[in-house]
Image (cartoon, rainbow, N blue to C red):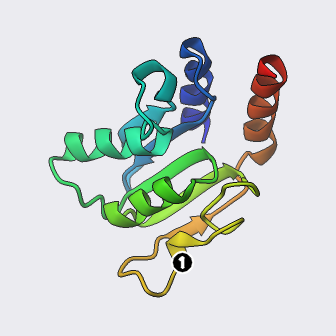
Amino acid sequence: MRLALAEARRAPATGDVPIGAVVVGPDGEVWGRGRNVREATCDPTGHAEVVALREAAAARGEWRLEGGTLVVTLEPCTMCAGAAVLSRVDRVVLGAWDERAGAVGSLWDVVRDRRLNHRPEVVGGVLAAECADLLREFFAEHR
């Protein structure tokens, strides 16, 4: 989570919301890193999770990221939860919960929907206060 937080801290330099993500393998090797880049790239899909999953898939040379763990500072939205399912990561580790738009247990629970063919394990609340504080400070300055 510390690596994801480091990515999140880089996002405000481009006006992006400080959310960071990493994909790590079973041995702890970092497969991919990402931070929000929607403002920087004018890309609505430029969420930290999507960026990290894309980098991990490119580095591994395959889209199936079995054995991997997606670590993200904020509970994924529906798009990112779907991307986690489609990438076949084994687990999603998140920092702060997002009761307004979270799709890994708060508002929706996309990743544990029994109708899907893959359901990653979810571990929530890792360094939650630090992750939430980073977002709170960002929005206090931008509102």
Question: Is 131 displayed left or right of 72 in the figure?
Answer: right
Say how many tags the image has. Answer: 1
Q: Nearer the viewer, residue 17 or 62?
A: 17
Are there few (<14), some (14-19), or many (20+) residues within 10 Å of tag 1? some
Instruction: Say which residue label 1 marks.
Output: 112
The residue positioned farthest toward the top in the image shown: 13
Image location of residue 30, percent across then percent down: 38, 40
- Quarter occupied by residue 129: top right
Can residue 88 be seen by looking at this rendering?
Answer: no
Q: Residue at x 81, y 22 (%)?
A: 143
What residue is rendered at 71% in x and 65% in y?
A: 106
Q: Secondary structure at mark 1?
A: helix
Residue closest to the far left: 61
Residue 110 left/right relative to 33: right
Tell me the quarter of the picture where residue 9 sits: top right
Q: Position of residue 4 (x, y in %)?
A: 56, 36
- In the displayed structure image, the side of residue 103 where residue 60 appears, left or right: left
Q: Residue at x 73, y 55 (%)?
A: 125
Q: Position of residue 22 (x, y in %)?
A: 46, 41
Q: Is residue 44 above or below residue 41?
A: below
Q: Is residue 119 above or below residue 68?
A: below
Depth check, front residue: 134 or 123: 134
> Looking at numbered disc 1 in the image, what kind of residue is underneath it?
Arg
